[in-house]
Image (cartoon, grey):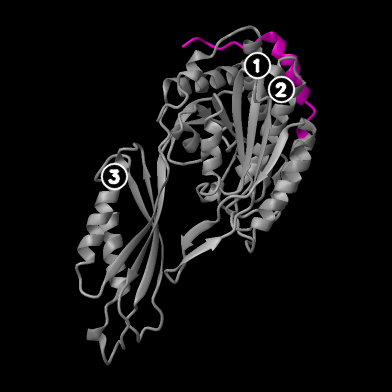
Amino acid sequence: MAHHCLAPDILPWLDRLNDQHDDMLAKTIELAEINSGSLNHQGVNQVLAQLQKLTAHLSAEQERIAVAPLTEVNDNGSMVQHRLGDALRLRKRPQAPLQVFLCGHMDTVFAKDSSFQQVRWLDDDTINGPGVTDLKGGILVMLKALDVLEQSPWAEQIGWEMLFNPDEEIGSPGSAPLIAEAAQRVHFGMIFEPCLPDGNLAGQRKGSGNFTVVSHGKAAHAGREHHLGRNAIRALCDFISAMDDLNGQRPGITFNPGYIHGGGPTNIVPERCIHRFNIRLEHPDDQQWCLTQLDSIIAAINQREGIRLELHGGFTRQPKLLTPANRQLLFMAKDIGHELGIPLEIKLTGGCCDGNNLAAAGIPNIDTLGVQGGAIHSEQEYLYVKSLVPRAKLSAAILLSFARASAFGEQFDWLAASSGEQQ
């Protein structure tokens, strides 16, 4: 694969980011201190309102889109709906020869009542705060990179579509259709999840499924009529044990029992219990094997008199496999990073993100273009603030390289060839 050299006339445009550190940091902190837990739709919409202001100068077509509510099984075994925040979509130059999709999520894993709400300094180079790395810092990287493109003489060569979605941390159930829709219009994607803690890019990713099992038994007095009861907790424990035993039976597949709730007073045989679990896998073909195994376990337990297990949920994200086009895009970023003094490697990861969704629709993408930090999804989440400007330069250089090459008549057949290709 040819080494991608950064054209010398791109470098002065990247220098425009040299004085942007303070602004990027201030806005990252401002966004992070708005609680935007996935189920706090008011908070997510507050972030959206801020982003409308931060993107107004881009003169793009702006659309606020309501997404479908999240439907899930509650602790009583009933189906409930949670309203989600809106999505914000911006589009500019839809007729340009090259189209790019940019994406960053507004939500975090920290609920409205979380104790983790404020940003604080850990040392001169590190802040700790909710979503500073995942993904508020990434939003500023995306916006500043786009600013540079828009100021450049090659901007007309690239049309872009930018999505701020409200529900990535819960699997993008409401915004997945918006990503699939964008995939019909674009050639490649840039997603601003944090880079890996060592600064590197994620390549291949596992797929993911989230499931709930509701176990129904029969209540009875634990002393007087124990023999008339049917214990929902015992039945569910048998399911969990059998499911957990599937670990190691097929390469790359993991089953993780994550949550269990049920029962009540100890003098009553429990009639209901629920369990939530996650499956990760490396190959799309493995989904059917997993479902067959789960169905088999449930069918066996449901043979017991008075016991009924119900399975809810499904696979929300396909594994992200690397097509030749995706490899070429990643190596392009790696080469550009090298020229900018940002050493990059491409690594496998078991994590999922919206890059999985875009890849499943056949669109090559880099999904770890955001800031460098770590301990995401915990109250120890931290951001190396000195990564803000270099990561913005990396993304700006990728955009400018495509735009400039297009202006000089280069064709990107390798991108077009992958469009619509199932991973």
Percent x, y of residue 64: 68, 45
Comparing 270 with 417, the one in front is 417
* Amino acid type shown at disc 2: Leu
The residues tagged by marks 2 and 3 sit, at their Cα atoms, a distance apart of: 44 Å
Say left or right for 95 vs 22: left
Percent x, y of residue 196: 53, 36
Q: Which residue is mark 1?
A: 403
Q: Image point 28% across, 39% down: which residue?
A: 251
Which of the labelled discs sits on residue 288, or is there none? 3
Q: Image point 65% across, 27% down: which residue?
A: 160
Q: Does 351 appear above or below 256?
A: above
Q: Residue furthest top?
A: 408
Q: Which residue is mark 2?
A: 149
SS at circle 2: helix
* Amino acid type shown at disc 1: Ala
Which of the labelled discs sits on residue 116, or is there none? none
Comparing 314 with 255, the one in front is 314
First in sequence, mark 2 or 3: give its number: 2
The residues tagged by marks 3 and 1 sit, at their Cα atoms, a distance apart of: 42 Å
Q: Quadrant of residue 114?
A: bottom right
Q: Is residue 331 magenta?
A: no
- Dots 1, 2 in contact, CB < 8 A: yes
Comparing 206 with 304, the one in front is 304
Percent x, y of residue 73: 45, 63
SS at circle 3: helix
First in sequence, mark 3 or 1: give its number: 3
The residues tagged by marks 1 and 2 sit, at their Cα atoms, a distance apart of: 8 Å
* Amino acid type shown at disc 3: Gln
